Amino acid sequence: MTAAQAPADVRVPAPTDPVEARRLQALEQLHLLGTGQEERFDRITRLAQRVFDVPIATITLVDEDSLWFKSAQGMPVDRAERQASFCDRTIALGTTHVVPDALADVRYATTPAVTGPPRIRFYAGQPLAGPGGLTVGTLCLFDVRPRSLDAGDVALLEELGRWTEQELAHSVEMDRAREVQQALLPQRPPELPGYRVAGSCQPAFAVGGDLFDHDLVGGDLVLSVADVMGKGAGAAILMATVRAVLRTTVRDSGARDGRRPEGDVLTATNRILLPDLQRTGSFVTAFHARLDAATGRVRYGDAGHGLSLVRRGTGGVERLAGEDLPLGIDVDQSWTEHEVVLEPGDTLFSFSDGLFDVLGGTHEALAEVTRLLEAHPEPDDLLRAVRALASAAAPLDDVTAVAVRRVPRT
């Protein structure tokens, strides 16, 4: 079927129509026009095709002059003209639109898709609401034989339409959430003479519950990796709170006493976060460190994280201590400060358990991470390797890591 032969109807609202202008604005907010087909929408059209026993089922987005088939079963095109389309009439009506026999309907009898291939005779369309409740498209059924829908069929089509609307809403919300979360992550590593720094976060879903941070505070490099229990939007909301509290605690600590133990930073963070974490039934693992650039001294606290390594330039990899509880368990919990020194050529690497899972999730996975670190001492190279592993494995958990290397003496 060509674009000109796609199922068609009668009318294009004038672009100057204020209602149509608002509808087009809502459609634009979806950020789906011109994008490829997605399995979450294809599941709906496949089901519709089978349940209603029709050769063609589509999810169609309708812009000013085009029909965009976000999902299409039995329709070998991805775009068609809006003018004279069945979908246009459904948009105008704002309710389920059924055409039992297009050839016997004066509105459609002479349209190309009815008089020529694929010779559409039956159409049923369910309008789809987007942002602001404005209709942005249709869920459509097409058949080459006349037929009708009973009340139960119409109810089912409406139910599939609501499912589709949920997926459309998910697109808007998750896209915005992804933008916000990416904006909260460091956009570039800090410039610290004598050191190279890199960080990366790859959510398993649109957004995730992992955090990495690296920043200069009082001349020191402050590093954090944290992981909220859970995944998706709920974990992402909590992680934004964790980031804000941890950053504020670090700066308040530096203002009062630049020598405050990093374990105390985690203790203060826990006291602030505990009510929210307990109400949501969640907890947070975290590695938090402060590096003195002049000496290479790293003071750190570990809240149930336990996934931090140091690769020595002289050979060998050490696992850093991390026996304390996660944040959000106990209001009276305190965290221990530990210390390690980065000599020239050494690399500090802290990562989330998502990387552990990518490598199999067993005891041997730590040995795989060790070999990865030994093979890629440079932070940029190391994080590229981590991202490649995550992309290839399609992980079920967020994969986050941060690395810092003290530049070797020349």
Image (spheres, rainbow, N blue to C red):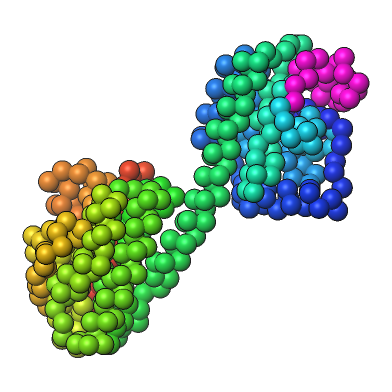
Does residue 358 appear to the left or right of 8 in the view shown? Answer: left
Image coords of residue 28 (percent x, y): 67, 52
Figure quadrant of the C terminus: bottom left
Does residue 288 appear to the left or right of 91 in the view shown? Answer: left
Does residue 341 appear to the left or right of 198 in the view shown? Answer: left
Was residue 102 drawn as part of the magenta stretch in this picture?
Answer: yes
**Above/below status of 234 relative to 11:** below
**Above/below status of 337 relative to 282:** below
Residue 400 seen by the camera: no
Q: Residue at x 12, y 46 (%)?
A: 363
Q: Which residues are magenta?
A: 97-122
In the depicted view, which residue is nearer to us: 94 or 54? 94
Image coords of residue 193 (percent x, y): 29, 86
Q: Quadrant of residue 298?
A: bottom left
**Above/below status of 82 relative to 48:** below
Count of numbered tags: 0
Image coords of residue 80 (percent x, y): 76, 37
In the depicted view, which residue is nearer to us: 139 or 359? 139
Q: Residue at x 86, y 23 (%)?
A: 108
**Above/below status of 271 relative to 109:** below
Q: Residue at x 77, y 11 (%)?
A: 146
Q: Quadrant of residue 130?
A: top right
Was residue 83 drawn as part of the magenta stretch in this picture?
Answer: no
Figure quadrant of the N terminus: top right
Q: Residue at x 20, y 55 (%)?
A: 369
Image coords of residue 223 (percent x, y): 26, 72
Does residue 59 appear to the left or right of 12 in the view shown? Answer: left
Residue 143 seen by the camera: yes
